[in-house]
Image (cartoon, coloured by chain):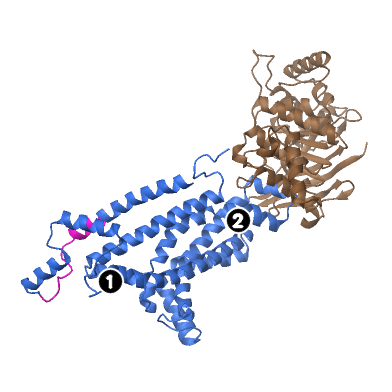
Chain colours: A brown, B blue
Amino acid sequence: MDKVLEVKDLEVSFFTHAGEVKAVRGVNFEVRKGETLAIVGESGSGKSVTTQSIMKLIPMPPGKFVGGSILFEGQDLVHKSDREMESIRGKEIGMIFQDPMTSLNPTMKVGRQIVEGLMKHEKISQSDAKKRAIELLDKVGIPMPDKRANQYPHEFSGGMRQRAMIAIALATKPKLLIADEPTTALDVTIQAQILELMNELQEEFGTSIIFITHDLGVVANVADRVAVMYAGQIIETGTVDEIFYNPKHPYTWGLLSSMPDLTNEEEELTAIPGSPPDLVNPPKGDAFALRSAYAMKIDFEYEPPMFQVSDTHFAKTWLLHRDAPKVEPPPIVQKRIQYFREKKQGKGEPNGSR
Amino acid sequence: MFIYILKRLFFMIISLLVIVTATFGLMRAAPGGPFTGEKELPPAIQANLNAFYGLDQPWYKQYFDYLVSIAQWDFGPSFTYKGQTVNDLINNGFPVSFYLGMEAILVAVAVGILLGTIAALKHNEWQDYGAMIIAVLGISVPSFIIASVFQYFLAMKLGLFPVARWDSFMHSVLPALALATTPMAFIARLTRSSMLEVLSNDYIRTAKSKGLSKNVIILRHTIRNALLPVVSYMGPLISAILTGSFIIEKIFGIPGLGMHFVTSITNRDYTTIMGVTVFFSILLLVSILLVDIAYGLIDPRIQIAGKKGD
């Protein structure tokens, strides 16, 4: 399969009064045509910075590319000028943001906000663009699109606004869609609708999607592959099945066990203790060691390399070294894995909390 | 929309009534009168004068007579300017103040928004610091000092403009600039801070992610939304500037309305005080109404006329 996007050793820092915040510390991943890559991690893990770097939406300064490259269809975006990026943003790469309440301009009609992007990138008349905008609103499931196009965002509900955002992002049929927690601000039933809509549109347009979330339940529903981010690095990556049935990194175990689940009412939710490390002075060795129950002496001294588990599955933990003691995931994670497997046999796909 | 304006007009009349009553009461409550002077007037003349201007009537009669005449747009004769009515004073003074005021407002708004926008776009760069130094100077240096500085350097030293008086457009430049400085500085600061706020909004990032260029984002998505605070400041500003600044008019010897406003108080010129106050209030109320309507036009979330049809 051809790669649409390839991120190599990306390092992004913010230079603040407190010092250099190393928000992204050497990230590698690729997105292939038509697939969905989910990037999972807690707040501050660098997932949004990574994806906003792809669009070059990071305010610079204080942000700065310290190293690495972002290859989009073979061309490096890191060295592109603002002007060159304008013809990539919105045309080749579309983006959906977390909060649909604030992501649309409150003083501009929704239709106009779609038309704007179309007219920037395509040679198209105002009235044709308007027609296309109405078609798009219809496509994303907004009833009475011709009337809705003439309304302002405050006349839309949250779910409707996110649909309008999707219409904006997909207006020019981009090759890559970056969805930065698109369902986090929505309630659960609307979430499911939006995810379904994104799946449908992906099939129709063949768009590749990078889906950022901290909700593993959502991941199971949408992703082909998963990258787990922690402290500005990807610490485990694999197919959805590999991450859910055979997680290797203690942090991934932590995420899986802190996932709310309707099936185990008696069990308490386990939280990952502590908080993410300070990225001004990232810890020596494994960044997760301080919070990990499985930390070994070496974790505090040397940073682990990426160990290969299978052709597609990699994890960055010393536990995979041949000299490391054999450690099994904690019981709650094993129970979950068991549960996912059973569910898969029943439904044909892994499923999380929802 | 029509009903909304009617409703607003109704409330404006009520506010005016309150203003008239309060001014009337306060004025009568202060000791002394228009004919109190250093030289005592003979009682007969005093009584005559009082009878002529109706001051011998009981206060409630005076009050209601006054209300009736105001309703007919008749502010009565001036007590101090013999042979002139307050209407004459307003008719002569207001056009001058209006001309000067509009010139000052145009300068203040245009330069203020420009400075504020530049400062916001070049946030924390020298352009920003430069614009804000100008703004702080404009706010903190009183207008009479600025006026004198202008007169000294631009008029006397360089001879670019006349020093004072009111004859031609050139005569209006210096007073208009002096009058515009403070509101201009204020508008610059307002624009800058609200621009910065708007620029940090998520929808600016959305606009950027659509591939729009920086200039388009600023023109189409930022300035309009950033102007709301400026528009709301415009209401009081317009009426304050239009009725004229007493100080500037005094310094430049301009026969505007502001001068009458102040001299009438020291003269105990009852009818002029009342007339100018009522006139000022009407201007204020109308400009606030205009601002509210403009607000609704700029921000669709503010619906002034209730639910629009459909």
Give the answer, above or below, for where A327 lies relative to B140.
Answer: above
Single out the residue that lies furthest toward the left: B43
In the image, B168 versus A206, the foreground residue is: B168
Q: Position of residue A64 (x, y in %)?
A: 74, 52
Instruction: Determine the residue positioned at 44% across, 75% down.
Output: B175
Q: What residue sits right under mark 2 in the picture? A: B223
Is residue B169 toward the left or the right of residue B92 in the image? right
Instruction: Determine the residue positioned at 23% across, 58% down.
Output: B66
Is residue B238 toward the left or the right of residue A80 in the image? left
Classify mark 2: helix, strand or loop.
Answer: helix
In the image, A25 versus B88, the foreground residue is: B88
Q: What residue sits right under mark 1 in the picture? A: B263
Q: Position of residue B225 (x, y in %)?
A: 58, 51
Residue A295 in view, yes or no? no
Q: Position of residue A161 (x, y in %)?
A: 66, 37
Q: Position of residue A159 (x, y in %)?
A: 66, 32
The part of the chain drawn in magenta is B22-39
N-terminal-most mark, 1 or 2: 2
Do pointers 1 and 2 mark residues of a single chain? Answer: yes
Single out the residue that lies furthest toward the front: B72
Instruction: Determine the residue positioned at 51% across, 84% down.
Output: B160
